[in-house]
Image (tube, helix red, strand yellow):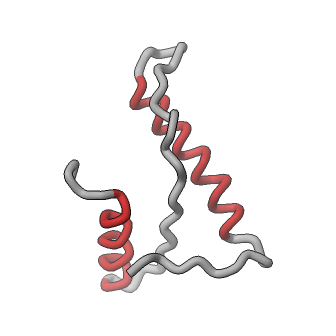
Amino acid sequence: MHSWAFAQLGQFLTYKAQQAGVVVVVVQVDPAYTSQTCQACGHADYNAAHNIAARGVVRWGEVMRPDAAPILAAS
């Protein structure tokens, strides 16, 4: 999986979820500067995961606003 582009991974997830009858919304966030080393634990990947998750929560709120324009996953 490490050689897949993130957009392609999102497409695969959406496709497989739809095949299984699961409603899915893929929220993309900018991963820039998320993997800086955490001062508390020293693990860059751990810090990046938390930063990406936090950005995803913010982006989810933007996408799910009642007045937000619909954003369709790329096909």
Give the image quarter of residue 6: bottom left
Q: Is residue 24 above or below residue 5?
A: below
The residue closer to the viewer here, 69 or 65, is: 69
Residue 48: x and y in percent read 47, 34
Residue 22: x and y in percent read 42, 80
Q: Is residue 31 above or below residue 40?
A: below
Q: Residue at x 55, y 38 (%)?
A: 51
Q: Residue at x 73, y 75 (%)?
A: 68
Q: Residue at x 38, y 85 (%)?
A: 21
The furthest residue to the right: 67
Residue 46: x and y in percent read 43, 30
Question: How many marks can you see?
Answer: 0
Residue 41: x and y in percent read 47, 16
Left or right, 3 with reference to 26:
left
Q: Quadrant of the N terminus?
A: bottom left
Give the image quarter of residue 10: bottom left
The residue closer to the viewer here, 72 or 66, is: 72
The residue closer to the viewer here, 73 or 13, is: 73
Left or right, 66 with reference to 1:
right
Q: Residue at x 31, y 66 (%)?
A: 8
Q: Quadrant of the C terminus?
A: bottom left
The furthest residue to the front: 32
Left or right, 51 with reference to 45:
right
Q: Is residue 35 above or below residue 62?
A: above
